[in-house]
Amino acid sequence: MASRFTMWMTTPIHRDREPLIPPDAVFVAAGDDSTPPGVVPGRPRSGDGKSRRSGAVSPLVRRLTILMLVLSSCAAGPSPVDGGAGEPASTPAREEIRVPLSLYVVRDGGDATSGLSSARTTEEARVIADDIGAIWAAADIVFDPIRVHEIDVPSDVLRAISESLDAEPFFAQVGRTFEVPDPGVVTGFLVRVAGGVNGFAPTGGRVFFVVDEPTVHDERVSSHELGHIFGLRHAFDDPGRLMFSGTNGTSLSAEEQVVARYGLEGLRVGG
Ligand SMILES: [Zn+2]
């Protein structure tokens, strides 16, 4: 397996094989926003699972599981033992978490006229990166350094993403038929189209894909996918929230901020 692949992919967590994690709680592939009938982007990639069916619980899973337990107890309100007698909860100052982010404008390296190349410029990608940073600043997560590159990817690889939301060939061929320089801890690929969705984040990974013309704001799609990568699930109560599917919401609840920061730390430790 290519080293870059393992660098990007955390110890895989497939929601159908890790019952300790609530369904959809973490690393759902985000078939956000405009998923057409019949497309189920959240399904585990069949090829991914085979070599990783170890029964051992990964440190990341343990970490997230513990976190979920902690959060669920926090959500119940202040406990009598925990300064609950009318004391205002003191929020300790948070440290900024700095995380390298790389964005790639993906061109069709085989046939420039195929219509599979992203039409974006690297300047546009940099604006998106800055706007992503503005959204995640709410959680004191700072994307730094930000790197933007153009990459050429074989037509068949892009076609699989474009037509069937299948990123397996992409991961199978990276480092072989095409290169991705300077990957960050989290990495986004700007592609022309992706199976009819605005963006997606393959299960268990630390990369996301965003299309050229999403139905919501570019930075919102990317930021939402990052939310999934950091361990957030969809929100259903308020369209103003980043994790509400299919809107331009950008807000992060206090709990989401905590979960995302822990999730991100897990990615960095697992890196
Ligand atoms: Zn989503």
Image (cartoon, rainbow, N blue to C red):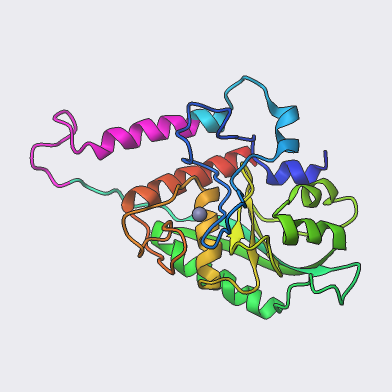
Horizontal side of 168 relative to 186 (left or right) equals: right
The relative height of residue 197 versus residue 42 in the rendered view (above or below) is: below
Give the residue at x 45% y 34%.
22
Horizontal side of 132 relative to 243 (left or right) equals: right
Reply yes or no: does residue 64 show up in magenta.
Answer: yes
User: Residue 113 placed where, x, y %?
Assistant: 87, 77
Query: On the image, which quarter does residue 130 sit in?
Result: bottom right
User: Residue 74 placed where, x, y %?
Assistant: 27, 37
User: Residue 6 placed where, x, y %?
Assistant: 74, 41
Give the residue at x 55% y 43%.
27
Give the residue at x 26% y 49%.
91
The relative height of residue 117 versus residue 101 in the rendered view (above or below) is: below
Horizontal side of 243 relative to 40 (left or right) equals: left
Q: Which residues are magenta?
A: 63-88
Q: Is residue 154 visible?
A: no
Q: Quadrant of the N terminus?
A: top right
Reply yes or no: does residue 47 show up in magenta.
Answer: no
The relative height of residue 224 versus residue 82 in the rendered view (above or below) is: below
Instruction: Judge by depth and name the residue closer to the eye, 94 or 18.
Output: 18
Q: Residue furthest front?
A: 37
Q: Quadrant of the C terminus?
A: top right
Number of numbered discs overlaid on the protein picture: 0
Give the residue at x 41% y 58%.
244
Query: On the image, which quarter does residue 190 sit in?
Result: bottom right
Q: Residue furthest top?
A: 55
Q: Is residue 89 visible?
A: yes
User: Residue 252 placed where, x, y %?
Assistant: 37, 58
